[in-house]
Image (cartoon, grey):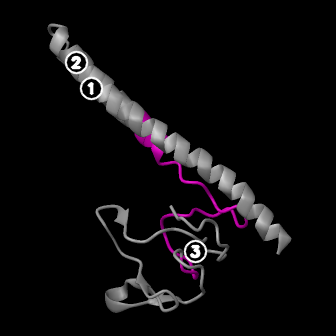
């Protein structure tokens, strides 16, 4: 059990760095859009430069913000395909529910999402069941 506590502590540090990077990327993206808009209004014929700068900023901030951490125990991705364990509670109760949508009978949660957004928190690794964070991603 001590090994799992050490893994959780290591993941806690990784997760805080991930959240900091995501927040910095969001603030940078918003600031860059406003600065680009201001420059577009001030510089005559600067439309091409604005769009090039906007695309570069969007690509960089998206890349920084979407680097989701991996599980410290099994090194698998925490988002994407689901394994045998519930990402919300960590129980091995994940099974196909209505219309093939995964359902956890332990926490009574459907693992659904729309437009690339999931409607559940990732608190545990879905491949090994290690409880990672009580707050969730």
Q: Which labelled disc corresponds to residue 8?
A: none
CA gap between label 2 and label 3 equals 45 Å
Residue position marked by numbered label 2 in the rendering: 38
Where on the picture, by quarter, is residue 92?
Answer: bottom right
Q: Which residue is drawn at the image coordinates 16% and 15% (left, top)?
A: 41
Residue 67 drawn in magenta: yes
First in sequence: mark 2 vs mark 3: 2
Q: CA distance from mark 1 to mark 3?
A: 39 Å
Side (left or right) of 51 relative to 76: left
What secondary structure is the stretch in magenta mostly built from? Answer: loop
- Mark 1 residue element: helix
Query: Contact (CB < 8 A) between labels 2 and 3?
Result: no
The residue located at (56%, 79%) in the rendering is 89
Task: Indicate the position of residue 76 as horizontal and vertical percent values.
Answer: 63, 64
- Quick one: label 2, few (<14), some, or many (20+) residues within 10 Å? few
Tag 2 secondary structure: helix
61 falls in the magenta region: yes
Range shown magenta: 60-86
Left or right relative to 44: residue 51: right
How packed mark 1 is, by other alpha carbons closer than 10 Å (few <14, some 14-19, many 20 or more), is: few
Q: Name above or below for residue 91 compared with residue 10.
A: below
Residue 31 in the image: state x and y as whole percent. Answer: 34, 28
Q: Position of residue 7 (x, y in %)?
A: 75, 62
Mark 3, residue position: 126
Of the numbered discs 1 and 3, the one sitting upstream in the chain is: 1
**Contact flag, marks 1 and 2 (Cβ < 8 Å):** yes
The residue that disc 1 covers is 34
Q: Is residue 46 left or right of residue 73?
A: left
Name the residue: 61% across, 53% down.
Answer: 15
Note whether 47 is above or below 2 in the view shown. above
- Indicate the secondary structure of the residue bearing disc 3: loop
């Amino acid at each position: 059990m001590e090994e799992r506590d050490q893994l959780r502590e290591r993941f806690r540090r990784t997760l805080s760095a991930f959240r900091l990077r995501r927040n910095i990327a969001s603030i940078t993206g918003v600031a860059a859009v406003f600065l680009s808009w201001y420059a577009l209004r001030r510089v005559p014929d600067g439309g091409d430069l604005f769009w090039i700068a906007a695309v570069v900023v969007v690509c960089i901030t998206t890349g920084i913000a979407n680097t989701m951490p991996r599980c410290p125990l099994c090194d698998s991705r925490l988002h994407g395909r689901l394994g045998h364990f519930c990402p919300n509670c960590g129980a091995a109760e994940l099974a196909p529910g209505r219309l093939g949508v995964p359902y956890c009978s332990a926490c009574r949660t459907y693992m659904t999402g729309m437009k690339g957004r999931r409607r559940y928190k990732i608190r545990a690794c879905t491949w090994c069941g290690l409880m990672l964070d009580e707050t969730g991603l």
